[in-house]
Amino acid sequence: KSSGYWQRIHTFACLNKNDRAIPLKNMKQNILALYLIKLSKWFSLVMPIIVLFYEDHGLGLQDVFILKSVYSVAAVTLEIPSGYLADVWGRKKCLILGCILFFGGYLCYSFTSTFTAFLFAEILLGTGQTLVNGADSALLYDTTVRYKKEELYLRYEGRITMIGNFAEAIAGIFGGLLAAYSLRLPFYAQAFVAFIGIPAAFALQEFNTKSKVQNPVSEILRILKYSLVTNRKLCYNIMFSGIIGAATLTMAWFVQPVLMKLETPTSYYGVIWTALNLTVGLSALYSDQVERYFGMRKSNTFILLVIVGGYISLAYNLTYWGLAILSIFYIIRGFATPILKGYINQMTFSEMRATVLSIRNFVIRLIFAAIAPFIGWLNDFYSLHVALLVSAGIIAIPGILFLVLQFRKAD
């Protein structure tokens, strides 16, 4: 049972839910602004060619994973405080600051050429991304709650995921074409795209605010305890979602090494990247229907089996047949993100929702930061085959553990 503290939070959230004073147009405005923010962060012109860009500047795959680990460390360090900041300071303010820092990160990439400068850019990008993570989904859920449309949250979350992946897919084509002229050109264009999120964030309407508390550290610890100790069901879902999120993030960074091993022409990188992300976007659009059909237990089991199986299958099919395996993997990735985030939203209160979602993102980034340099080292000193197989094992063991714990808690 919840303590009196959490009962008061729940009562406050219910009072907000019944308040219908704000015009319906603000709901539509918020959703449109969140679409634009997603577009500004996912219209990724640089992702299909970024490994080539690093290689052109003398970096190996281990260096690449170190850079991405720095990104994750920045995200891990600020993930939970930023979620709490969104709950207390405001979702909108965090989204504005996050979009500004994200824009600054790509400006840095556009005009520098050293490993150290790239590290600084990754810190800006990681911090900016962290301020957006959790705050966007929390604001979306608060918006649906305000108008008693909670049942539509998963649909909107799926659409936002679809928009992000469609944007990344389309951007892949343009990024590949721009890179054919210069590997630097996609970064100039990326900085312009990142800027779009700033005015969109300013256009957001805040639906749920919280008065300033006396001891924020104490309250963060209270939320951590509730999420990871008191509410075991929520804890198991956060950990399982974090493992799956880290697995899909790691696979995204394996795509280009696979294409490089296959000696794929540079002009095809964008096309392949586009096809993969279109599969994510399309599957995310139907995530609510998939969840209703399978339910929580079967959905989670299916997601884990395909994710782990994807790593193993790809390790033994480093040919163009491997692209079909990647396509299946990306389809499940599209289902997994909105479904798993939806479960977490259902299990928590509005007043701590952004913090709890940030705990999930914290788990994702912590796992990635811990394993990425090791996986990159395996690739550089052994083989891509070995790196994929080890990744499968790293994901499978804790994934099965928390899946079983979920089942036991549900029984």
Image (spheres, rainbow, N blue to C red):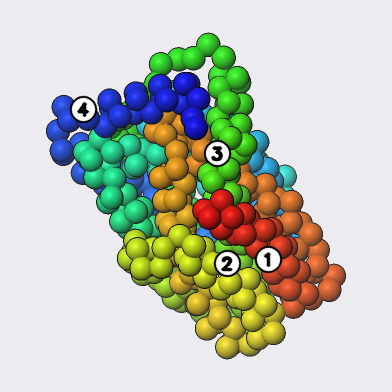
Contact check, label 1 and label 2, Cβ < 8 Å:
yes
Residue type at tag 1 = Ala
Q: Position of residue 252 (x, y in %)?
A: 58, 65
Q: Which mark is residue 396?
A: 1
Dot 4 falls on a residue whose secondary structure is: loop
Which of the marked residues, 3 or 2, is nearer the chain's N terminus? 3
Q: How many C-alpha atoms fall within 10 Å of the one at disc 4: few (<14), some, or many (≥20)? A: few
Which residue bears the numbered disc 4? 19
> CA–CA distance between discs 3 and 1?
24 Å
Which of the marked residues, 1 or 4, is nearer the chain's N terminus? 4
Whether residue 86 is visible: no
- Asked which quadrant contains residue 254, the reply is bottom right
Nearer-the-camera pick, 115 or 102: 102
Contact check, label 1 and label 4, Cβ < 8 Å:
no
Which residue bears the numbered disc 3? 231
- The residue depicted at 58 percent of the width and 72 percent of the height is 305
> CA–CA distance between discs 1 and 2?
8 Å
> CA–CA distance between discs 4 and 3?
28 Å
Residue type at tag 4 = Asp
Which residue bears the numbered disc 2? 304
Relative height, residue 98 to residue 263 (above, below): above
Residue type at tag 2 = Leu
Dot 3 falls on a residue whose secondary structure is: loop
Q: Position of residue 324 (x, y in %)?
A: 52, 83
Q: Position of residue 25 (x, y in %)?
A: 16, 39
User: Farthest front residue?
Assistant: 411
